[in-house]
Image: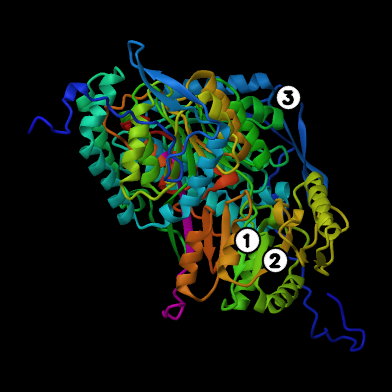
Amino acid sequence: MSDDSEFAESGDRLAVAKTYKLFIGGAFPRSESGRTYQVTDADGHFLANVARGSRKDGRDAVSAARKAFGGWSGATAYNRGQVIYRIAEMLEGRRAQFVDLLRDGGEGQPGPVVDAAIDRIVHYAGWTDKLAAVFGGANPVAGPFFSFSAPEPTGVVVAVAPQQDSLLGLVSVIAPIITSGNTVVVLASQTRPLAAVALAEVLATSDLPGGVVNILTGDPAEIAPHLAAHGDVDALDLTGAEGDLRTSLERSAAGTVKRVYAPPISDFGRVPGTVRLRAFLETKTVWHPTGALSLGGGGGY
Amino acid sequence: MTLDPHSPGVRAATDWDYAPAPESAAIGRVRDRYQMFVGGSFVDGGGDDLETLNPATAQPLSTVSTASVADVDVAVGHARKAFEGSWSRLSGAERGKYLFRIARSIAERARELAVVETLDNGKPIKESRDVDIPTAAAHFFYHAGWADKLQHAGFGPSPQPLGVVGQVIPWNFPLLMAAWKIAPALAAGNTVVIKPAETTPLSILVLAEILADADLPPGVVNILPGAGDIGKALVQHPGIDKVAFTGSTQVGKQIQRALAGTGRRLTLELGGKAANIVFDDAPIDQAVEGIVNGIFFNQGHVCCAGSRLLVQESVADEVVAKLQERISTLRLGDPMDKNTDIGAINSAEQLSRVTALAATGEDEGAVRWTSPCPVPDRGFFFPPTVFTNVSQSMRIAREEIFGPVLSVLTFRTPDEAVAKANNTPYGLSAGVWTEKGSRILGVASALRAGVVWANTFNRFDPTAAFGGYKESGFGREGGRSGLAAYLNTDDEGI
């Protein structure tokens, strides 16, 4: 390169910092409240200003999730599997970025954790077209009827992501919810929200329809109570809500008989079972007459 | 039997009176007094005795000793001891054999149980005899087979029981609901404390005799008759690991609220306001039978009753006319009569609730039609009632009446039918009547309801999961998903 190169010496250049925003309905809005809060690394050094989502942002996210539910739950299982696999592909392509983010945030073993997060998404991508066979089937009823039971998604799920494990925990919460066709509003880790916002960028480039996953940053204790009482929310995943917050959210959920999944603190390094998948499934049973055999031996059909 | 006054000695051609065909009440062997069943013994409870009525006569039927809150504690203690002792030491195969025994004994005493059920509940003997009791036996038989096959149920290699289960059941299918609750709980290895409804405690106490005769280890099943306060004490007892409740959505919400933060498992089987959708290509006569079965089975005391008839506008007049004609032939009266189609409303309280809600139909502008059938002058009876000109905003279209009252609404397009059917906080069941296969499957998949009956209604089987979407509750009963409600499957992974 000649001396008059426009490329600056690497040490001289000021990096372009990212504005961390919410992810609602496939778009990246700032909080309608205009509020932000500062995120720091383990040593207290400034990392970023992050949107502090509000009750209104939460309601917008629920609207977006409801709007997306029909299309996502109605998509073929094969299609959902492909879209979810695409998320893993996009995450793999940004592996280095996520390793840096986790390292900056002071989380341990960033490399293996990002790898595990990618693999977890692949795991769930393969579940979409197995669910109906594994958790449904024909019912051998004692009568001239064909009866079958099939799992269906519950609807709009609000999830409080784990506060510590900001990527693998988040992915482990989101993936099983959307695998079966639910849509989700997830409240990211309050102190470690950067991986969640970066994941939103992965989702936005993964063929995932807008609104299937909505990610809010901010204070879960501020936003979650409104969503736990929201009439258009069908279920809660309280993995990241503990103690009194968990209890009060569970209590609010009773107002419209929401399904609540509130597990003990999880070690997300373990192999996934099916509990999270089943937590947000409904079973629908359908009956139809087949026509009884007549006494004369002919069919009743 | 009446005679045609114009042709003395000749029975009128249109006279459809039946000779009475009463089942013998003596078969029920109803005793003067029943006791609680706790720790394998029949004992007096600390609560006041309650008098249970025959709703068909409003006369006392028997007296039942009830539990006090202290008795709940004792019963939970027995259940815990049994769970940690004798019951958990049994192999699944041995556990299953107890359930098979119970299933057989129910079948052996089936007619006795049917009579007890009809006398205590008011439902027609032909329903208790042909539906309630055989299906209860079938539930024990089905779940008996699961006890040694839990590892094959699809919930990991070694699903574990939850522990002590607290169960509260309603009065509409007293023995059948007991079977739905007890059989899967025991098959999965749990022990049970169960409270029957205040107005229908008898059949489950006959079941207690069957459990005792089967030598079921003491404390595995404990039965506590009582009122709502005992149910409340039971579901909130800290020694309970899982609560299963069938009843109103209002009480279900209270229980869910009360259990918040406790980590205890909960399944709820709550109310419904099912749409029964009739398309213009449906076989109308079959549909009429299905509509009648959907709303008048068990006097409409059915959480999955087809209480909202959605009929396509082009056939609405025809369907309603045929429906009224058919309903006029239904025989209302003595539940013990084998010809009776519609029995007694379970209690004076329920009769007044049904009466009050039906009155709002007229107040809000719906057109009321009542079957001309004679109504007995004693007991709790409500004649079959159909409301037309119903709009979705009316209380009779929104609220669960839990009685023989049908609200008729119309629609023009399949999309409108689905939108109206789903326009309710409930989501327990629905019906679809059409000859078009793709319409059945398409509408069934669009309905947000746990059970969809197509060209049939009110079918139940232990192999087929039953349970609600939305505010009709969560968890299933029957099938593999019903079994999951009584298993701890958490250990299999994150």
Local packing at callout 3 (Cα closer than 10 Å; few below 14, some 14-19, many 20+) is: some
**Residue A168, x across and y down, in percent:** 30, 30
Q: Chain of mark 3?
A: B
Q: Are the residues at dot 1 and dot 2 in contact (C-beta closer than 8 Å)?
A: yes
Q: Nearer the viewer, residue B192 or A169?
A: A169
Which quadrant: the N terminus of chain B? bottom right
- Left/right of residue B165 with respect to residue A206 in the rendered view: right
Q: Are the residues at dot 3 and dot 1 in contact (C-beta closer than 8 Å)?
A: no
- Vertical position of residue B133 compared to residue B297: above or below: above
Q: Which residues are magenta?
A: A279-301
Look at discs 3 and 1 and give the one toward the viewer: 1
Local packing at callout 1 (Cα closer than 10 Å; few below 14, some 14-19, many 20+) is: some
Going from N to C along the chain, the mark reached first, 3 or 2, is 3
State the SS at label 3: loop
Q: Chain of mark 1?
A: B
Which quadrant: the C terminus of chain B? top left
- Left/right of residue A139 with respect to residue A1 in the rendered view: right
Residue furthest to the bottom: B7
Is the same chain shared between marks 3 and 2? yes
What residue sits right under mark 3 in the picture?
B47
The kind of residue tagged 3 is: Gly
The kind of residue tagged 1 is: Lys
**Residue B62, x across and y down, in percent:** 75, 39
Residue B409 shows which numbered tag? 2
Going from N to C along the chain, the mark reached first, 1 or 2, is 2
The kind of residue tagged 2 is: Leu
Q: Nearer the viewer, residue B103 or A105?
A: A105
